[in-house]
Amino acid sequence: MGTKTRKKHRKFKIFILIFSLLLIIGISIFLLCYYVFDIKTKAVIITHMWGHPCEMDKIIEICKKYNLFLIEDCSHAHGATYKGKKVGTFGDVGCFSFQANKIVTGGCGGIMITNDEEIYERACLLGHFRNRCFDSVKSEKYSKYSNTGFGLNYRIHPLAATIAFNQFKDLDNRIKIRNKNLNYLSKKINDCFILKIV
Ligand SMILES: Cc1ncc(COP(=O)(O)O)c(C=O)c1O
Protein backbone atom coordinates (compact mmCIF):
# COMPACT_ATOMS: atom_id res chain seq x y z
CA MET A 1 0.00 0.00 0.00
CA GLY A 2 1.41 3.41 -0.99
CA THR A 3 1.94 6.25 1.51
CA LYS A 4 -0.90 8.28 -0.04
CA THR A 5 -3.40 5.40 0.27
CA ARG A 6 -2.34 4.80 3.89
CA LYS A 7 -2.88 8.47 4.71
CA LYS A 8 -6.32 8.34 3.08
CA HIS A 9 -7.21 5.26 5.13
CA ARG A 10 -6.07 6.93 8.34
CA LYS A 11 -8.16 10.04 7.60
CA PHE A 12 -11.17 7.87 6.85
CA LYS A 13 -10.71 5.97 10.15
CA ILE A 14 -10.46 9.23 12.10
CA PHE A 15 -13.60 10.50 10.39
CA ILE A 16 -15.50 7.29 11.24
CA LEU A 17 -14.26 7.48 14.85
CA ILE A 18 -15.37 11.10 15.32
CA PHE A 19 -18.69 10.43 13.59
CA SER A 20 -19.37 7.40 15.84
CA LEU A 21 -18.42 9.35 18.94
CA LEU A 22 -20.78 12.21 18.02
CA LEU A 23 -23.53 9.72 17.26
CA ILE A 24 -23.08 7.98 20.64
CA ILE A 25 -23.01 11.33 22.49
CA GLY A 26 -26.14 12.50 20.62
CA ILE A 27 -28.06 9.31 21.37
CA SER A 28 -26.98 9.39 25.05
CA ILE A 29 -28.13 13.01 25.44
CA PHE A 30 -31.44 12.20 23.77
CA LEU A 31 -32.05 9.16 26.00
CA LEU A 32 -31.00 11.06 29.12
CA CYS A 33 -33.32 13.98 28.33
CA TYR A 34 -36.14 11.64 27.39
CA TYR A 35 -35.98 9.62 30.58
CA VAL A 36 -35.20 12.51 32.92
CA PHE A 37 -38.06 14.51 31.41
CA ASP A 38 -40.37 11.54 31.52
CA ILE A 39 -39.60 10.28 35.01
CA LYS A 40 -38.16 13.06 37.17
CA THR A 41 -39.74 16.32 36.06
CA LYS A 42 -42.71 17.36 38.16
CA ALA A 43 -43.32 20.94 37.10
CA VAL A 44 -42.54 23.48 34.43
CA ILE A 45 -41.79 27.09 35.37
CA ILE A 46 -42.21 29.67 32.65
CA THR A 47 -41.50 33.40 32.70
CA HIS A 48 -43.52 35.87 30.64
CA MET A 49 -40.45 37.99 29.90
CA TRP A 50 -40.64 41.75 29.39
CA GLY A 51 -44.43 41.72 29.34
CA HIS A 52 -44.63 39.26 26.44
CA PRO A 53 -46.80 36.24 27.22
CA CYS A 54 -45.29 32.84 26.40
CA GLU A 55 -46.81 30.53 23.78
CA MET A 56 -49.33 29.10 26.24
CA ASP A 57 -51.08 26.70 23.85
CA LYS A 58 -47.86 24.79 23.23
CA ILE A 59 -46.76 24.89 26.87
CA ILE A 60 -50.12 23.64 28.13
CA GLU A 61 -50.05 20.85 25.55
CA ILE A 62 -46.63 19.69 26.85
CA CYS A 63 -47.73 19.92 30.50
CA LYS A 64 -50.88 17.90 29.79
CA LYS A 65 -48.96 15.33 27.79
CA TYR A 66 -46.41 14.73 30.58
CA ASN A 67 -48.78 15.42 33.50
CA LEU A 68 -46.69 18.34 34.78
CA PHE A 69 -47.60 21.19 37.10
CA LEU A 70 -47.33 24.58 35.47
CA ILE A 71 -46.01 27.61 37.36
CA GLU A 72 -46.18 30.99 35.65
CA ASP A 73 -43.75 33.71 36.68
CA CYS A 74 -45.69 36.85 35.73
CA SER A 75 -43.32 39.29 37.42
CA HIS A 76 -42.73 41.16 34.15
CA ALA A 77 -46.28 40.88 32.95
CA HIS A 78 -48.83 42.11 35.47
CA GLY A 79 -52.11 42.48 33.58
CA ALA A 80 -50.82 40.95 30.31
CA THR A 81 -53.14 38.65 28.37
CA TYR A 82 -52.72 35.71 26.03
CA LYS A 83 -55.64 35.20 23.63
CA GLY A 84 -57.80 37.36 25.91
CA LYS A 85 -56.98 35.49 29.14
CA LYS A 86 -54.83 37.01 31.89
CA VAL A 87 -51.39 35.47 32.41
CA GLY A 88 -51.10 33.73 35.75
CA THR A 89 -54.44 31.98 35.25
CA PHE A 90 -53.27 29.29 32.82
CA GLY A 91 -51.13 27.24 35.17
CA ASP A 92 -51.56 25.72 38.62
CA VAL A 93 -49.78 28.70 40.14
CA GLY A 94 -49.12 32.28 39.04
CA CYS A 95 -46.48 34.45 40.76
CA PHE A 96 -46.12 38.23 40.59
CA SER A 97 -43.13 40.01 42.08
CA PHE A 98 -43.61 43.51 43.55
CA GLN A 99 -39.87 44.25 43.45
CA ALA A 100 -39.01 47.89 42.76
CA ASN A 101 -38.76 47.73 38.93
CA LYS A 102 -42.03 45.95 38.40
CA ILE A 103 -45.10 47.54 36.84
CA VAL A 104 -46.86 47.21 40.19
CA THR A 105 -44.43 47.54 43.06
CA GLY A 106 -44.43 47.69 46.82
CA GLY A 107 -40.63 47.97 46.95
CA CYS A 108 -40.56 44.27 47.76
CA GLY A 109 -42.89 41.31 48.17
CA GLY A 110 -45.25 39.72 45.70
CA ILE A 111 -48.34 37.59 45.31
CA MET A 112 -49.11 34.05 44.33
CA ILE A 113 -52.41 32.97 42.81
CA THR A 114 -53.88 29.51 42.43
CA ASN A 115 -57.26 27.89 42.11
CA ASP A 116 -56.05 24.70 43.76
CA GLU A 117 -57.14 24.50 47.40
CA GLU A 118 -54.28 22.23 48.48
CA ILE A 119 -51.60 24.42 46.86
CA TYR A 120 -53.21 27.46 48.48
CA GLU A 121 -53.13 25.93 51.96
CA ARG A 122 -49.56 24.71 51.57
CA ALA A 123 -48.47 28.16 50.34
CA CYS A 124 -50.17 29.80 53.34
CA LEU A 125 -48.30 27.47 55.67
CA LEU A 126 -45.02 28.15 53.91
CA GLY A 127 -45.32 31.90 54.20
CA HIS A 128 -47.36 32.43 57.34
CA PHE A 129 -48.36 31.14 60.75
CA ARG A 130 -51.08 31.70 63.38
CA ASN A 131 -53.91 34.11 62.42
CA ARG A 132 -53.57 34.00 58.63
CA CYS A 133 -53.33 30.22 58.74
CA PHE A 134 -56.16 29.88 61.27
CA ASP A 135 -58.30 31.87 58.80
CA SER A 136 -57.17 30.24 55.58
CA VAL A 137 -56.13 26.65 56.23
CA LYS A 138 -59.26 24.57 56.76
CA SER A 139 -58.41 21.03 55.70
CA GLU A 140 -57.87 18.31 58.28
CA LYS A 141 -54.61 17.40 56.57
CA TYR A 142 -53.01 20.84 57.00
CA SER A 143 -54.88 22.81 59.70
CA LYS A 144 -52.85 21.07 62.43
CA TYR A 145 -49.80 23.05 61.22
CA SER A 146 -51.52 26.45 61.43
CA ASN A 147 -50.01 27.53 64.74
CA THR A 148 -46.43 27.42 63.45
CA GLY A 149 -46.82 27.13 59.69
CA PHE A 150 -43.95 25.16 58.17
CA GLY A 151 -41.51 27.22 60.24
CA LEU A 152 -40.79 29.96 57.74
CA ASN A 153 -41.92 33.54 57.42
CA TYR A 154 -42.33 34.93 53.92
CA ARG A 155 -44.97 37.52 54.76
CA ILE A 156 -44.96 40.73 52.80
CA HIS A 157 -44.34 43.87 54.83
CA PRO A 158 -47.75 45.53 55.45
CA LEU A 159 -46.51 48.86 54.10
CA ALA A 160 -45.29 47.20 50.87
CA ALA A 161 -48.64 45.43 50.56
CA THR A 162 -50.51 48.72 50.97
CA ILE A 163 -48.37 50.49 48.35
CA ALA A 164 -48.76 47.63 45.85
CA PHE A 165 -52.49 47.35 46.55
CA ASN A 166 -52.97 51.02 45.68
CA GLN A 167 -50.81 50.76 42.57
CA PHE A 168 -53.01 47.94 41.31
CA LYS A 169 -55.90 50.39 41.05
CA ASP A 170 -53.82 52.26 38.46
CA LEU A 171 -52.68 49.17 36.57
CA ASP A 172 -54.35 49.95 33.21
CA ASN A 173 -52.81 53.42 33.17
CA ARG A 174 -49.39 52.04 34.12
CA ILE A 175 -49.57 49.55 31.23
CA LYS A 176 -50.57 52.39 28.86
CA ILE A 177 -47.54 54.47 29.93
CA ARG A 178 -45.17 51.52 29.43
CA ASN A 179 -46.66 50.85 25.98
CA LYS A 180 -46.26 54.52 25.07
CA ASN A 181 -42.61 54.46 26.19
CA LEU A 182 -42.02 51.23 24.26
CA ASN A 183 -43.53 52.66 21.06
CA TYR A 184 -41.49 55.85 21.44
CA LEU A 185 -38.23 53.96 21.91
CA SER A 186 -39.02 51.47 19.12
CA LYS A 187 -39.69 54.30 16.69
CA LYS A 188 -36.49 56.11 17.63
CA ILE A 189 -34.46 52.90 17.25
CA ASN A 190 -36.04 52.16 13.87
CA ASP A 191 -35.40 55.75 12.73
CA CYS A 192 -31.70 55.30 13.45
CA PHE A 193 -30.11 54.15 10.19
CA ILE A 194 -27.76 51.60 11.77
CA LEU A 195 -30.30 49.99 14.08
CA LYS A 196 -33.33 47.84 13.33
CA ILE A 197 -35.74 46.10 15.68
CA VAL A 198 -36.17 42.51 14.54
C1 LIG B 1 -39.02 37.51 36.10
C2 LIG B 1 -38.69 37.67 37.55
N1 LIG B 1 -39.05 36.69 38.40
C3 LIG B 1 -38.79 36.79 39.73
C4 LIG B 1 -38.15 37.88 40.25
C5 LIG B 1 -37.85 37.91 41.71
O1 LIG B 1 -38.69 38.75 42.37
P1 LIG B 1 -38.45 39.13 43.91
O2 LIG B 1 -37.31 40.07 43.93
O3 LIG B 1 -39.74 39.76 44.31
O4 LIG B 1 -38.18 37.85 44.61
C6 LIG B 1 -37.76 38.91 39.42
C7 LIG B 1 -37.08 40.09 39.98
O5 LIG B 1 -36.56 40.95 39.44
C8 LIG B 1 -38.04 38.80 38.03
O6 LIG B 1 -37.68 39.78 37.17
Image: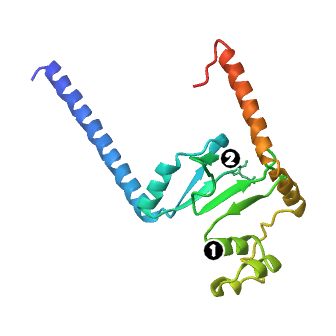
Residue drawn at 68 percent across, 25 percent down: 186
Task: Give coordinates of residue 142: x percent, y percent.
Answer: 66, 83
The relative height of residue 109 versus residue 136 in the rendered view (above or below) is: above
- Label 1 beta carbon less than 8 Å to ligand 1: no
Task: Give coordinates of residue 12: x percent, y percent.
Answer: 21, 29
Q: Is residue 183 or residue 25 the one in the foreground?
A: 183
The label shown at residue 71 is: none
The earlier-in-sequence mark between 2 and 1 is 2
Q: Amino acid at mark 2?
A: Ala
The label shown at residue 77 is: 2
Task: Give coordinates of residue 152: x percent, y percent.
Answer: 75, 72
Residue drawn at 69 percent across, 46 percent down: 76
Residue drawn at 29 percent across, 36 percent down: 18
Left or right: 175 in relation to 194: right
Q: Is residue 115 or residue 30 the one in the foreground?
A: 115
Residue 147 figure quarter: bottom right
- What secondary structure is found at the residue carrying circle 2? loop
Q: Residues within 10 Å of mark 1 (few under 14, many from 20)?
A: few
Task: Give coordinates of residue 197: x percent, y percent.
Answer: 61, 24
Left or right: 9 in relation to 51: left
- What secondary structure is found at the residue carrying circle 1? helix
Which quadrant, please, contains the C terminus? top right
Q: Which residue is under mark 1? A: 117
Quick one: which residue is furthest to the top in this view?
193
Residue 164 figure quarter: bottom right
Residue drawn at 63 percent across, 43 percent down: 49
Which quadrant, please, contains the N terminus? top left
